[in-house]
Amino acid sequence: MKRSKKNIRLAIGVVSLFALSTSACTIFSPEEPEMSDSEACAKLNELIADHANNFKHFRRGRGSSSRIGNMMQIWSAERVFPLAKNCQVWEWSSGLTNYFCSWNESDELQAKQSHDKGADIIGQCLDKQWQSNFVNTQSGGGRTLFNQEGGKTIISINYFKEPRTILENWKTTLYVGDESNLKAEVK
């Protein structure tokens, strides 16, 4: 009986230590610092200029890249936008490249607010040569596309409900890159 109580205490101690250590990692893991709108504009304009270099200045180390067959290579990328989370550079086998970020939203209202704020920031960052166009998507979301006459780079910020899921999963995405990659039908 003494041995059994000792084993139970030991098990509780190990579980407690594990729980404490994992929660400490969550508490102390560094979050991305807040980014002002002016910092975002400077970064966004640097990103647009670096599109001609396949976003090489925004890719994170070589160790973070992955290849998906012969179709594309993906690198994790520096965050350049205040709302953005998971950012990557995609280089397609066709030679086209794009910078892409996505982040989850709690519901449609938050996704729309995130889109609207993002579109407003982008609009403030770009000069008068850029035009914007908003379209509603089939999922009930929306997309604002920014482009300039004769320009190679386009910017798109979208919000949408993820298809093929039983849950109400909403996302917002930021895309900077070649227009050819956005020729797919808006869902």
Image (spheres, rainbow, N blue to C red):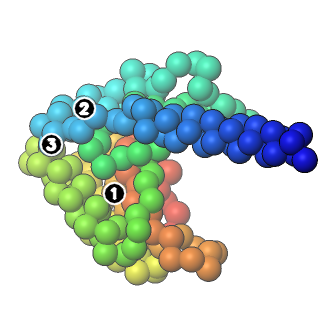
Residue drawn at point x = 17 percent, y = 51 percent = 121
In whole angstroms, how far apart are the C-alphas of marks 2 and 3? Answer: 10 Å
Give the number of the disc on residue 157: 1
Secondary structure of the residue carrying tag 1 is strand
Question: In the picture, residue 85 is in which quadrant?
Answer: top left
Residue drawn at point x = 46 percent, y = 79 percent = 139
Kind of residue at disc 3: Asp
Give the residue at mark 3: 37
Q: Earlier in the sequence, mark 2 or mark 1?
A: 2
Closer-to-camera residue (90/184): 90
Q: Residues within 10 Å of mark 3 (few under 14, many from 20)?
A: some
User: Marks 1 and 3: CB-CB under 8 Å?
Assistant: no
The spot of residue 53 in percent (x, y) is 41, 23
Q: Nearer the viewer, mark 2 or mark 3?
A: 3
Kind of residue at disc 2: Lys
Q: Residues within 10 Å of mark 1 (few under 14, many from 20)?
A: many
Q: Residues within 10 Å of mark 2 (few under 14, many from 20)?
A: some
Q: Nearer the viewer, mark 1 or mark 3?
A: 3
Give the number of the disc on residue 43: 2
